[in-house]
Amino acid sequence: MVGVFGSVRKVCGRWRDAWHSRSGAGGNGTAGGRPPGEGRRPRNLFEAAAAYVCACAADDQEGIDEAAGWVSPEALSFGVNELACRAVVALARERGESPRVVARELLGLPSA
């Protein structure tokens, strides 16, 4: 189980590093931390969910706060739920197990 979370942290770390390199101080980002070319385009709820989950996995409170401000709390909740569902299904397929087994294992629950 630690391997799964290690993989999530590694992927999220790469995403966060790429994001900050584009929008950080001295970078090519625009005001508000948006990468060039994004202008005033509203954030997609799935972008917000991915950023929020990655920030949570990395224990990055600044990133959590930023992503939480991109969309409404309801939209963020929906996006995080959709991301969780897709992740469990993908991991279940990879392991050849049912999504129920994978979800319970990830949460540290006993087998049903």
Image (tube, rainbow, N blue to C red):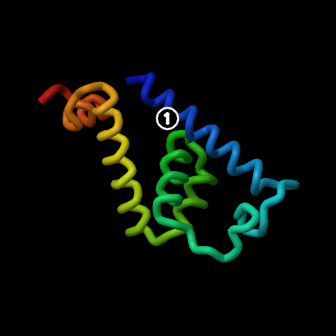
Numbered label tally:
1
Q: In this view, does 76 lie to the left or right of 35?
A: left
- What residue is rendered at 37% in x and 42% in y? 87
- What residue is rendered at 47% in x and 59% in y? 46
Three-letter code for the amino acid on which mark 1 is drawn: Val
The residue closer to the viewer here, 75 or 88, is 88
- What residue is rendered at 53% in x and 45% in y? 54
**What residue is pinned by disc 1?**
8
Expressed as whole percent of the image width and height from the top left, the position of residue 4 reads: 43, 28
Looking at the image, is 72 positioned above or below residue 68?
below
Quadrant location of the C terminus in the rendered image: top left
The residue closer to the viewer here, 112 or 100, is 100
Looking at the image, is 111 positioned above or below residue 13?
above
The residue closer to the viewer here, 90 or 4, is 90
Residue 75 lies in quadrant: bottom left
Expressed as whole percent of the image width and height from the top left, the position of residue 15 reads: 62, 44
Expressed as whole percent of the image width and height from the top left, the position of residue 10 reads: 57, 32
- What residue is rendered at 78% in x and 54% in y? 24
Q: Which residue, as the protein is rendered here, is positioned at the far right?
A: 26
